Image: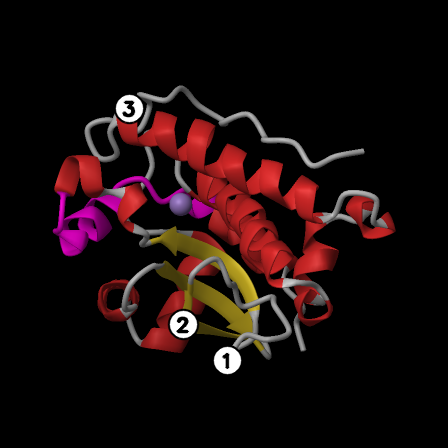
Amino acid sequence: MAFELPALPYAYDALEPHIDKLTMEIHHNKHHQAYVTNLNKALEGHSDANLPIEEIVKHISKYPMAVRNNGGGHFNHTHYWNVMSPNAGGEPTGDIAHAIQTSFGSFAEFKTKFTQAGITRFGSGWAWLIVKEGKLEVTSTPNQDNPLMDIAEVKGFPILGMDVWEHAYYLKQQNKRPDYIAEFFNVINWHFVETNFHAAPKG
Ligand code: MN3
């Protein structure tokens, strides 16, 4: 049983005009595929190749760097495709809206913090909204690390992840990462974020 590239839950052009078709095609079909291929290579003949990717990610310190980079890449991108959706964005409602209000004061304050986390992540990496000890927190990770990893500086349960690698936006926004982040807010699937919020450990 090898890891496989999951199908995108919508068409490559479904996030237009916010995220363009060519970026989505290359990002999914080339970048994510490469993480999957290289993860399979790195775990070839290893019994852990049958574990769910979450289990590998949680105990990432016991694996070589190739598993950290490519296993992280596989986990993060699988999350990312689902955290975006056509006809999405806007302000959340329900339990997740309430939790954001409680933790950050307002949605606008959360948006500022999350945007800053994405902008200030030097080089390649991710911005995250996590559940940590029952509370929401914004953090970021370098490369393909994520807050589930035992090596993460700030650990927690990721409920919303934003890819800020240049490959996520360079064809459309070139060097303007803040423009990509503004567009990302137009495609956030808050229902998926809320589902993750409910699945997070409470303690
Ligand atoms: Mn990416």
Q: Amino acid at mark 3?
A: Lys
Q: Do the CB atoms of the residues marked 2 and 1 lie less than 8 Å apart?
A: yes
Q: Which residue is mark 1?
A: 153
How packed mark 1 is, by other alpha carbons closer than 10 Å (few <14, some 14-19, many 20 or more), is few
Instruction: Check the image and report above or below for 118 versus 88.
Output: below
The residue under label 2 is 139
- Label 1 secondary element: loop
Distance between the alpha carbons at the discs numbered 1 and 3:
34 Å
Q: Which residues are magenta?
A: 174-191
**Is 78 or 186 nearer to us in this picture?**
78
Q: Quadrant of the N terminus?
A: top right
Q: Which numbered disc, 3 or 2, marks the residue that appears first in the sequence?
A: 3
Secondary structure under tag 3 reads helix
Q: Position of residue 190 (x, y in %)?
A: 42, 47
Q: Residues within 10 Å of mark 2 (few under 14, many from 20)?
A: many
Position of 148 with respect to 103 (left or right) is right
Place of residue 17 in the rendered image (x, y in percent of width and height, measured from the top left): 19, 28
Q: Which three-letter amino acid code belongs to the residue tagged 1?
A: Glu
How far apart in space, not on screen, are marks 3 and 2 (Cα)?
28 Å
Q: CA distance from mark 2 to mark 1?
A: 9 Å
**Is label 3 or label 2 in front?**
3
Q: Secondary structure at mark 2?
A: strand
Residue 175 is a magenta residue: yes
Of 88 and 146, nearer the camera is 146
| Residue receiving disc 3 | 21
- Left or right of residue 129: residue 149: right
Of callouts 2 and 1, which one flags the residue occurring earlier in the amino acid sequence? 2
| Image location (x, y in percent) of residue 52 | 75, 48
Task: State ligand 1's quadrant.
Answer: top left
